[in-house]
Amino acid sequence: MLYPAAAEETWERLNTVIDHAVAARPACLQARDLMREAEPDWFQRPDMVGYVAYADRLAGTLRKVGDHLDYLAELGVTYLHLMPLLRSREGENDGGYAVASYDEVEPRLGTMADLAALAAQLHERDMNLCIDLVLNHTAAEHPWAVAARAGHPTYRRFYFFFPDRTLPDRYEQTLREVFPTFAPGNFTWLEDAQQWAWTTFNEFQWDLDWSNPDVFVAMAEVMLNLANQGVDAVRLDAVPFMWKREGTDCENLPEVHELLRALRALMAIAAPATIFKAEAIVPPDQLTPYLGSGDPEHHECELAYHNQLMVLLWSSLATGEAQMMTNSLRRVAAIPSHASWVTYVRCHDDIGWAITDEAAASMGWNGFDHRNFLNRFYSGEFPTSFARGEVFQFNPETGDGRISGSAASLCGIELALADNDPTHLDIACRRLELVYAVAYAFGGIPLLYMGDELGLRNDHTYLADPAHRDDNRWMHRPVMDWSVAERRRTPGTIEARLFEMFAGLARDRAKCEALHGAGRVELPGSADPHVLSLVRRHPHRGSFAMIANFGAATVAVSIASLGLERARLVRSGGASVDADTMVLPPLAYAWLSAE
Ligand code: OTU
């Protein structure tokens, strides 16, 4: 039990929150609740394709996002994730992850009414809206934080305050540092309050104390209000950090799962159409529990980011082998059939090399050396590198670093264009296609990160903005240039090639019933270590297989080895069929389906 001392009282307060939310729920959303209850697997359908964008960088305002739905429809998008859009603090705000008001939309972007109108517009077109909900922390400028800082006792208890370093020092012994460069340590001294505040992320992001039932009730209200605007999925930011206990790393504690199950239950009562997406960038053993145990009593999040797959794809592109991906993915536990992954190649964050020493050892490599190699490779430092990224948050104490950069630049498109080298440009485009083709086939909702469909390269204009210049993640958060997007209609341009590639991935995916998210993923392995083979089996929708060649030589794979009967080719990805053999040139792949 989360709040043993206040269980009954908390439940009563939550009942009032639920009553208000139910009374305020618009009729159209109540109808949506019924529709979703009748098709609870809506987010697992093979025609689901996500698109991730900042509203301002995509279109300027929420209203103007509505002007670009045809563009998204061309890409087969059915799920639009708009990056943080609630009112954030001024100046540096971690891309909106420092929220100053959960009840208002960022004024630059529009109003709550605009958000509701956009949701309705998306729903008319069978598209779904996902937005961020930052649960772990608020901005230091949020009214709760302002009151806490001023000494208001009720709000002091919303956060973690310490008069001296005694407890912070004890906690620090087992905590990691998320932003060692621009926000070292996990606590921030507040001169005016003469207190240390817990700040896992930036100094201006104060961790909430979820062991206080007032925080739970306040956030429950926030969450249901957002659901009532027509939000179909909430991306729960930084959930692993929501509960702290001395002597632990304060991530993924059992209470975090209890909190999420309790929030999940509230949502199911008051706004059943809305689902949860966990943002937990943690090792697989700690990640899968966020998708629940399969037992209806333990429903938690419907979706979670498959960070492992993302990292392994980049590792395989750099090394040309697929064996470590196979080994590592085999170790990820199966997830309940009512839950799914979101798969992705790039997002707004850096790429952290979450490859364990054990996974590296399965290849005979040293884990540290391999992670270090990936940093050197993707920052372009390694001699044969095709990538143009930059190291993010290098920690001299541990030697760890992460990588920033757009997918196109990391795949070699930037370098090939700079060299004016059409052969390399073709290879670089095939790299991008290969990794996205795995993300579109793996199972769950694939996310297309804004700009990748046009091959947008790194954008260095962030360096001129004082609120952004210390954070090189902005290099892969470009502003959409609609004149570049227009070139998708001009044959022979790189924009036309990539845009059509993404539209095709979505079209072909939608045709494969076996890609329904409830199916199982199998990694049968392959005789050639450069080849990834992936099989998906659904109990009654058939089977699907993907074979992908990450290596530099042409390989032949027997179709029979995939164990699919009467398989037909749904997407050739540069591969060809010769009797019962698939021939895969370097970076080619094939999708096969058996219904
Ligand atoms: C998230 O990421 C967001 O995606 C980031 O953009 C934010 O800066 C951050 O939260 C704070 O709101 O550490 O390196 O396990 O890994 O929450 C990115 C989850 C992060 C964390 C994740 C966090």
Image (cartoon, rainbow, N blue to C red):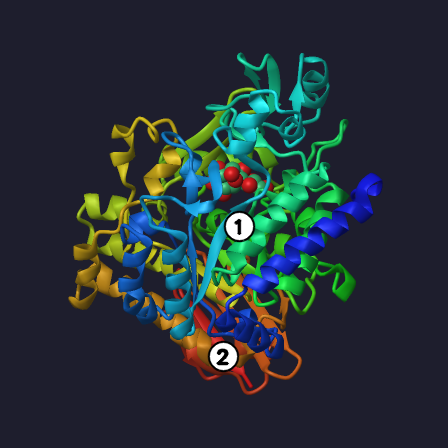
Q: Residue at x 27, y 40 (%)?
A: 459
Is 351 positioned to the left or the right of 468 in the image?
Answer: right
- As measured in the structure, the alpha-carbon distance from the residue carrying label 2 to the one carrying label 1 is 24 Å
Task: Give the residue at x 59% y 59%.
Answer: 21
Residue 321: x %, y % from top left: 51, 53
> Which quadrant of the rendered structure holds the C terminus?
bottom right
Q: Pointer 1: what residue?
A: 312
Picture quadrant of residue 452:
bottom left
Position in image of residue 307 (x %, y %): 55, 50
Residue 394, x across and y down, in percent? 48, 26
User: Dot 2 corresponds to which residue?
Assistant: 512
Q: Amino acid at mark 1?
A: Leu
Residue 365 seen: yes
The residue located at (25%, 64%) in the rendering is 497
Residue contact at pointers 2 and 1, CB within 8 angstroms? no
In the image, 333 versus 324, the foreground residue is: 333
Residue type of the residue flagged with mark 2: Cys
Tag 1: Cα neighbours inside 10 Å, few (<14), some, or many (≥20)?
many
Image vertical order of residue 343 relative to residue 410, above or below? below
Q: Residues within 10 Å of mark 2 (few under 14, many from 20)?
A: many
Query: Would residue 359 be seen by someone viewing this image from the given angle?
Result: no
Q: Please tell me which of labels 2 and 1 falls first in the chain.
A: 1
Q: Nearer the viewer, mark 2 or mark 1?
A: 2
In the image, 516 versus 159, the foreground residue is 159
Local secondary structure at mark 2: loop
Q: Against 27, is 360 above or below?
A: above
Count of numbered circles on the image? 2
